[in-house]
Amino acid sequence: MPLARSLSVTSLSGLEEWDEEFDREDAVLFEIAWEVANKVGGIYTVIQTKARLTCEEWGENYFLVGPYMESSVRTQVELIEPCNAALRRTIDKMNSSGCKVYFGRWLIEGSPYVILLDVGFTAWSLDHWKSELWENCSIGVPWFDREANDAILFGFLTAWLLGEYAAQCDEPPHIAAHFHEWLAGLGLVLCRQRQLPVATIFTTHATLLGRYLCAGNVDFYNNLAEFNVDKEAGDRQIYHRYCLERAAVRCAHVFTTVSQITAIEAEHLLKRKPDIVTPNGLNVKKFSAMHEFQNLHAQSKARIQEFVRGHFYGHLDFNLDKTVFLFIAGRYEFSNKGADIFLEALARLNYLLRVNHSDVTIIAFFIMPARTNNFNVETLKGQAVRKQLWDTAQTVKERFGKKLYESLLVGQLPDVSKMLDKEDFTMMKRAIFATQRQCLPPVCSHNMLEDSSDPILNCIRRIGLFNTAQDRVKVIFHPEFLSSTSPLLPMDYEEFVRGCHLGVFPSYYEPWGYTPAECTVMGIPSISTNLSGFGCFMEEHIADPSAYGIYILDRRYRGVDESCNQLTSFLFQFCQQSRRQRIIQRNRTERLSDLLDWRYLGRYYVSARHMALAKAFPDTFIYEPQEPTSATGFRYPRPASVPPSPAHSLHSSPHHSEAEDEEEPYDEDLEAEKDRVNIRQPFNMPNWNKNQTVSLPEKN
């Protein structure tokens, strides 16, 4: 079901450039989101990583607006006095009227200004504002929905802030306000209802109803046009939230979504076709030498191997040098994030590896936060035993080295049989006896509060992956976000990702997909789907994604069983790769990071803001629509040298020799240079003049 679009990722290379200067003396940008300086979801990453580029564009006229959260402010925000005179008067007026408004700099790249609104301090106005919302918009919010109550408080405070700022300006200002998601959307509705001089943009990162419907195991994408949206929202008791979201979409001057797949969803569920698709990016830091990120992979992999040695003590009957680390991470949505199909594919992969007598072992990590009460005692014991063995080995090594040194000093070759005495053997035997284990290595690293009803654990019980010696696939469920201060697996998420070999994200509902994007930037291959924004984006811009380490799983046009078989095939092919093939593939994957840099993708937000200003202030800002230009010059071709995937190679057996690999032609520098000519250089931030005509693609 193709969506006619005015501006989307297919026209990335043909987007217009702006070279003229733009007078921003009376133009300001407010970007409003619940995740500003408040890490609760993926939108936090969008705002945080995009801030530097937006600051370069708007300078001192860019302000982020979010909720005041004391714990976050204490560590992330430097509170200061506003330098903008109109804004200083605005904040003083609001504070004197019973609000608490804070101003400061967010301590991230770009150091953007932030305005933080204390919604709790203004809770006394909730009933009055609910009544006003009902009278003016006919939207009623039940008292028990705390999140919706916060959205009302935040929305009214945001509209108050923008209206007060417009009133405090000496001359009529040109204000652009960009709202993210339904939690901030009410502020947009109130701006339009009060006829404030504000150009409004609304971005949905995932529709409310879409997330709920997919979690309910419905055939979502094949029935998008058939849903009775009001009934579905009412049945799930989110009708008031849905009304807030839909009102923001309908009232916005410019409506955007983060991916083409979400644009199709929004057209049917929110009843408006997006004006622009604004894909999410990252701040990409390139290495001066190609081998640097490969070295980081080796270092992080060694740390994961140390954890594995402890976790599987007493059952470490597999070769860690022939062990492949897979992982899935993110919000614990068992079906939406594809954990169900991943587990089923692991069971089938385990069978394939066993019947083919493969010497490869797979360890699959599930990094998804769930309710726990502590670490698993057996898991902690494993790390203690590993440390004890290490200490014993170090002690024996020091004693052996001292005797060897003394023997050499007197000019004698050492008698190796006398280097280790009885005490050394006793110490080592005690250490070996300590590794004896009566139980299997645990599947879960923590004690789950709802063990008997946990979806992942119940699925593992059904498929029988219990980390036995016969299993070639081992599973470790870590129901907590990773931290460098953890006594169990002391690694940050970024370090952990760098140490793994493959990220697996077979999501059924994934509007964009930051997890595979982060893998790509770090040079780690990943599996995504054609129902995720990231997967669709990569299919548009890469002729053969799998050759670059981006495997796209078909979950839109295949049934669950067929998709599971395809995922199993991807995993089995990946297991057959030699070490050299994996290195080649990581090099190719890392080169794709240019596609995800905000310096490329940020131009869509630039277009959205200019389009909104032109609609809100037609006497000052003008644009002439035109047909989008083609996407030539922005598509990676299939690599000319041998692909790293065995699926495309001439070898019929996974047991070919390393010598055969060495004969395969591959020139890293030549291939990298060919890839570089297929992507445009990053653009400089545009500077526009007032009363100028700027050509933008035509709205359909």
Image (spheres, rainbow, N blue to C red):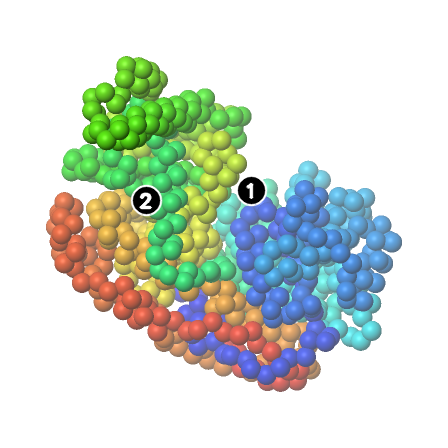
Q: Is residue 96 visible?
A: yes
Identify the mark at residue 506; answer none if there is no mark.
none
- x, y percent for residue 148: 66, 46
Query: Circle 2: is it few (<14), some (14-19), or many (20+) Cα within 10 Å?
Result: few
Identify the mark at residue 560; answer none if there is no mark.
2
Residue at x-position 37% and y-position 34%: 306
- x, y percent for residue 15: 47, 76
Is 222 in front, or is 92?
92
Amino acid type of disc 1? Asp
- x, y percent for residue 575: 24, 44
Is 463 in front, or is 273?
463
Q: Quadrant of residue 687?
A: bottom right
Residue at x-position 38% and y-position 45%: 299
> Marks 1 and 2, how far apart in space?
26 Å
- Mark found first going from the N terminus, 1 or 2: 1
Amino acid type of disc 2? Val
Left or right: 71, with 260 as reference point: right
Eyeballing the image, is 633 above or below 260?
A: below
Q: How many marks?
A: 2
Query: Dot 1 corresponds to which residue?
Result: 235
Residue at x-position 86% and y-position 53%: 97
Q: Secondary structure at mark 1?
A: helix
- x, y percent for residue 347: 28, 35
Residue at x-position 60% and y-position 69%: 56
Eyeballing the image, is 191 above or below 489?
A: below
Left or right: 382, with 180 as reference point: left
Left or right: 239, with 481 as reference point: right
